[in-house]
Every structure is written in structure tokens, then in C-alpha cells.
Amino acid sequence: MTESGSSSVGSVPNGATVLAVMRQASRAPSVHNTQPWHWVFDGTRLHLYRDNDRLLTSADPMGRQLVISCGAMLHHVRTAFAAVGWHTDTTRLPDTGRSDYLAVIEFRPWPDPPIGVLARARAIDHRHTDRLPFYPPTNWSQLVHTARMLVTPHDLELDVLDENATTEIAAASAQTTATRRYDMPYQTELHWWSGHSGDQEGVPRESLVSDAEFARVGVGRSFPSAPHSARRANLTEDGARLLVLSSSSESITTWLHTGEALSAVLLECAATGSATCALTHITETPTGRTAIAGMLTHPGVPQVVIRVGTAPDEEPPPEPTPRRPIADILTMSDETAER
């Protein structure tokens, strides 16, 4: 859904447009594919709430990654609405007395959104998390330049780690995994949300990698392993580059902006042909965050690490990761649904 000129009532998108946009935007990434968001369209404005029932109490007790996930969908929503001719004026944390109320969107017609926005909207449908080894990214300097321009409005920093830093990141990743190995609540939670097929949420078995494949990447969350396979066997070493999104402080607003910036970077990568995998497990522990902070050239709080590379052209696109039914994540007023 990326064509401008959708029907509207006055200066508000109609019910059919809202439904179509929200279905597309629900492709947004979220931690363990928990999809921890709920939206309400009251006929004029669109409200975003966090779904606390989907909080990962072991991996994410403070709800940082939950809010980052909601921020990623917020950006997906704004991008998808822009592609059909709607500017979204967004107020974050509109009611400081409600921690679950994350944002409210108001609409204005936007007949000529930038070409880059349209490209990122088209990328929503084919962007996916790729946990396999990569070839090195192409047009790297230009991609980094554009990504930084997209991140800056969110008051975050985007750092490119030195190619030699991969070894240090892999060590931090392995240490995080070792710390969690005998954490039974964490392991129970991880297995609940991953490794199953046919569910509408969670990381499906088809999206996981085997032990042999993971060994050639070395940087990633230790999910339950897939059955033995050796995809991309010719890639004996991972050629991915690593980006880090970092902030100057910690707050719910910062986390929301982190998700928006993450979405923008992932969609820009997908639009320009790069493969990605967002890594959040390293920043779940103080030790991991300290290790990453030491690799930055400035003081900062690491929020997300992103692997970026190139996937083989000859590979068929993967099946889309399942998503919850739209009725489970969006409530619309009766009048709006009829329009």
C-alpha cells in the first residue's frame, strides 16, 4: 500500500485507509515478535498504547524493549500514512499520568511526500530480520550518511563500529549468553516466544538458524536452534558491519525515539538492498552495555546494535513472519469502521 490519493473524509483518512495502513505497518519489528502495541482510532486521531500483557518480565523487566518496539511501529505507521498522502503530527507521551499511553497522531493532507519516504514505505512489505551470515554491505558510506540523517531528528547517535570491533561484540554477545544460560525464567520465556510454527506471534522456527549457521555469525541472541542446515555455506565468515544506536540518557521518550530511529534505519537498509538484523540481547545486561559503550567515540547509552550486510541475490524471499490479526491490535469507533 504505497499509492497516494487514498479517499478521505475532510482532513482525516477514512476507515478503509486506516485499516489498510495499519495492516501494512503491523509488519514492524518487535522484541521476540511480541507485537506489544494497541492502537485506537477515534475517528479523528490515532492513539498508541503499550500492551503490558506482552512485557518480557525476564529479558525486559523495565519495558525498555517493549517501548522501543512500539516506537518502531509508530514510525512504520507514520511512514505508511505518508505514502498514501497523510502527514502525521505526533505527540509523544500526551498524558504524563498514563505510562501506557505512548503517542497520539493527528492528520493533515500531504500530497507530495519525499521520494525517500515512499521508498521506505515500499520496503515495509519485504523488510525482515536475517540471522544468517552476510556479504559485506554495498554503498556503505552513502547508506551510513542517510541513516545518520534519519536518526538525528530523534536526538540519538548512530555509530559505525570498526570492523575489528566484531570480535569484541561477539565476545560480549557470548558473555551475555553465558550469563543467561542457567537463568530458568529467562530460558522459559525465550522458549515460550520462539521456535514454534503456525503461531500469530513469536519468532517462528523457520526464522531461526542452526548451530552451524550461528557459529559463522557469532553475534546474536541464542534462540533455540533450528534443525541442522548450512545455508550460505560459502560464507565462512560474516561480512556484516555493525551500527549502534545510542542515547545521552534513559527515559520512556528516549526509548520511543529509539524505536522510531531503528525503524527508519531498517527500512532505509531494506529500500537500498541491504539485509539487517537488530540485536537487543547485548544491551539487556549492564555488562553488555558497558562493553559496547567502551567502543563508542563519545559518552552514550547503547540501545540497539544493528548488523548490516548483503544477502545473496539468488535466494528466494522468506515467508513473512506471522502477525496478529488487525482486530487484536486496532480498535476503531463504530462510525469510523463504517466509512
Image (cartoon, rainbow, N blue to C red):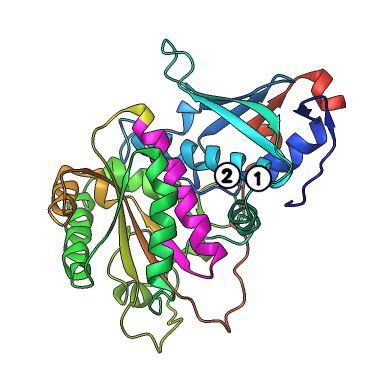
Crowd around label 2: few <14 · some 14–19 · many ≥20 (10 Å): many
Name the one closer to the observer, 4 or 175.
4
Disc 1 target residue: 80
Amino acid of disc 2: His
Q: Residue at x 44, y 58 (%)?
A: 146
Of residues 228 and 32, the one nearer the viewer is: 32
Total numbered labels placed on residues in the image = 2
Instruction: Looking at this view, name the residue that lies furthest to the bottom.
Output: 234
- Which residue does the numbered mark 2 point to in the structure image? 76
- Which residue lies at the image location 32% right of the left edge and 59% below the top edge? 243
Query: Is residue 69 shown above or below 48?
Result: below
Corner quadrant of residue 61 = top left
Q: Nearer the viewer, residue 82 or 190?
A: 82
Give the image location of residue 282, x and y in percent.
Answer: 25, 52
Q: Quadrant of residue 171?
A: bottom left
Q: Nearer the viewer, residue 329 or 134?
A: 134
Residue 108 x %, y %: 69, 29
The magenta segment: 254-277
Question: Is 276 a magenta residue?
Answer: yes
In screen coordinates, is 4 left or right of 143?
A: right
Quick check: can you spot residue 204?
no
* Circle 1/circle 2 CB separation < 8 Å: yes
